[in-house]
Amino acid sequence: GAGVSQSPSNKVTEKGKDVELRCDPISGHTALYWYRQSLGQGLEFLIYFQGNSAPDKSGLPSDRFSAERTGGSVSTLTIQRTQQEDSAVYLCASSSEPGQGKTQYFGPGTRLLVL
Amino acid sequence: DQQVKQNSPSLSVQEGRISILNCDYTNSMFDYFLWYKKYPAEGPTFLISISSIKDKNEDGRFTVFLNKSAKHLSLHIVPSQPGDSAVYFCAASLNAGKSTFGDGTTLTVKP
């Protein structure tokens, strides 16, 4: 498909384990965003990529969270030593370029449950 | 401190009537505002946006109004349809498209 895809769609893990979440943006989109939505909450910004660099990492909640993007395309969000409070839906979005007026297209999200 | 607030967690409207969803923000530096719609188990989809230089933007049944002095925006849907039932998120953008989202309002349109 031509949309943003994310994998896995669901992930259940045990507290203390590491998880990797993947995002495939729309082909050609240079800007990529990661958000997190906890139960009953709005979307919380985590990190933004322009190409392979991350000008804004201000939303990462702790040093257990990291993200990378390679080839200006696929991005992975890694959570080390997961905690129960990390349970949330992790959403990825891409846009043709960063900036106002550039619509962000969201993937379906990865539902992470940390037991 | 939550910078974007949607104070109504839910709204129920009869089909054919107007739905009005409200959003307040605190950061006067925000200069671009968006509304997203989200169905269960799907990612949000862009609905409509407005730049801070405007006070109204209309797209079909959807109109967004911005009152900068009150730091308030609203989304009007008229006429409302059952397929509009979803969670609506208000978002405000400062730069580079990074958006700050409200907690969402669940709209139910009853047939």
Image (cartoon, rainbow, N blue to C red):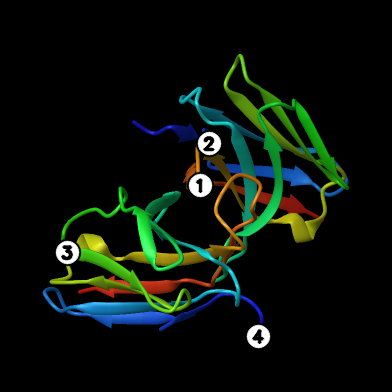
Can you give x and y, in whole percent of width and height, for residue B66 in the image? 69, 27
Closer to viewer: mark 2 or mark 4: 4
Q: Amino acid at mark 3?
A: Arg
Chain under disc 4: A
Q: Tag on residue A1?
A: 4
Report which quarter residue B10 is drawn in: top right
Question: Residue lying farthest top?
Answer: B69
Q: Is residue B111 left or right of residue A15?
A: right
Q: Residues within 10 Å of mark 4 (few under 14, many from 20)?
A: few
The Cα–Cα distance between marks 2 and 3, rounded to whole angstroms, is 30 Å
**Which numbered disc flags the more N-terminal residue, 2 or 1?**
2
Chain under disc 2: B
Chain under disc 3: A
Can you give x and y, in whole percent of width and height, for residue A63 in the image? 16, 59
- Is label 3 in a helix, a strand or a loop? loop
| Callout 2 and callout 4 share a chain | no
Discs 2, 4 touching: Cβ within 8 Å = no
| Callout 2 and callout 1 share a chain | yes
